[in-house]
Amino acid sequence: MRRLLLTALVLTGVVGCGDDVDPVSLVTRPRILGFDLSVEGDPERTTPAPGETLTITVPFAFPEESLDVDFQGIACFGVDVGFGIPFCAGDESDPTGGIFALLADRSTAPAFPVVSFPIPPEAADGTTVLVIAATCAGGVVDPELLSSALDPTQPLDGSLEVCAGGVGTGELVQSRIPVQLEEDDTNTRPLSLVQVELDGQLMGPDPGAVPGTPCAEMAELVTLRVDGDAVDLIVEGAPETFEDFFREGADDQPIATVEDMQVALLITSGEVQANFLFLERDDVVEDTEYTPATSEERTLDLSGSLERLWFSVRDERGGLAVESRAFCLLPPAPI
C-alpha cells in the first residue's frame, strides 16, 4: 500500500529541467482534475456518513478530443499518519487488508468515470476513507499493476506505467475523504464562480467544442491574438460558498474557521502568471495575468483556434467544483 502511494506522489511531483519545460498549467496530455464527491440523496454534500453511499465523478481535462477513460481502484479506512504517506487500516490478520470496496468504471467520451460505494457502518471518530486508483485515458488500466502495488510482498520495479500495453495516458491517484459523524461535520461542494473576465470582457458559457476548432465566426467568444500582450484574468466567487466549520486546534480544542477556496487554473495554450488563486469570504475576487500563445506555439489561419481554460475550485474539506470557459485565439494582427 505504501509503495503505491509513493508512486502516486512521484507522479504528481515529476519536474523537468531546462528552459523548454512546459508551464505546469498547460494541458499537453489528459489530466485528471480531482474527485468530485456527492452523497446519494443529498447530491451537494461531499461528506458521507456511515451507511450512506458516496459517488465519485472523476473529471478530466483534454488538450484535444475527449477520450474514453478506464478507472480501477480500491476504498478503505485510512490510517491518520499526521505526516507522511497514508495507508489502509487493515493489518496482517485481516484478509481484506482493510479494503471494503473495489472500484471500477470505463467511461465513454465525453462522459467521465463514475463510481459509487457504501460507507461501512463501523466508521469511528476521526475516520477517513482512503481511495487509491489508477486511471488510463485512451487505453485500459493494467489490473496487475494495481494488485502488485497493493501487495507488500512484491518488489517495486519503479515503473510509472499503468496502461495495459503502454497504450493511453495513465495516472496513479489517491485521496482521503472525511466521514461525517456529526451535523457540524457537513461539507457541501463549492458553488460555481459568479463570473470570469478575460481582457476586460466577461466570458460566457463554454460552447463545448474541441480545442483547436475554428472559432472566428463564434461571436459569443472573447478574442485574443497570437503573440499578444499579457491580459488580466479575473475570477469572482460567490460569498455564500464559504462555509463555517470547526478546525481541530491545540489540545483537540475546536477553532471556529471560515473555509477558503483554492482555484487551480489549467489552459490549452499560453501561460498564466499564477497557477492557483485563493478566494476568501471577504475577498471573493482574485486576478492574474494570462499571456496568449506565441506564433511558435500556434500557427493559425484566419479561422482561429478555440482555446479552453479550466477552473478547479476546491474547499478545505474535500469539495470540488470544475468548470471551464473558452476564447478564440486569432492570428497576429496585420501590420
Image: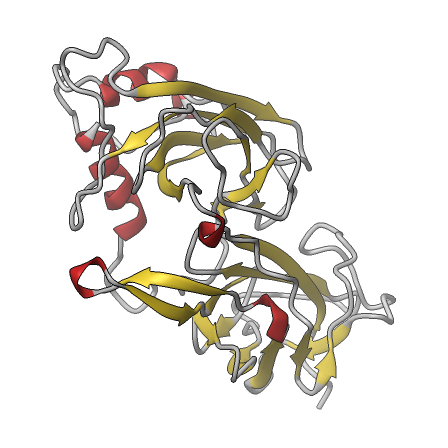
Marks counted in the figure total 0
User: Relative to 321, is 51 above or below?
Assistant: above
| Nearest the eye: 291 or 83 | 83
Q: Position of residue 291 (x, y in %)?
A: 53, 79
Q: Which residue is located at x 31 percent, y 48 percent?
A: 12
Q: Is residue 168 above or below residue 184?
A: above
Q: Quadrant of the C terminus?
A: bottom right
Locate residue 132 relative to residue 315 in the image: left or right: left
Which x, y percent locates residue 269?
55, 64
Look at the image and name its color scheme. Answer: secondary structure
Give the residue drawn at x 41%, y 40%.
179
Closer to the camera, 243 or 95?
243
User: Is residue 92 in view?
Assistant: yes
State the residue in front, 225 or 175: 175
Between 301 and 266, the residue placed more toward the observer is 266
Residue 249 figure quarter: bottom left
Q: Is 146 left, or right, of 206 in this rendering?
A: left
To which quarter of the image does residue 129 belong? Answer: top left
Residue 250 x %, y %? 18, 65
- Residue 237 shows in the view: no
Which residue is farthest bottom? 335
Q: Quadrant of the N terminus?
A: top left
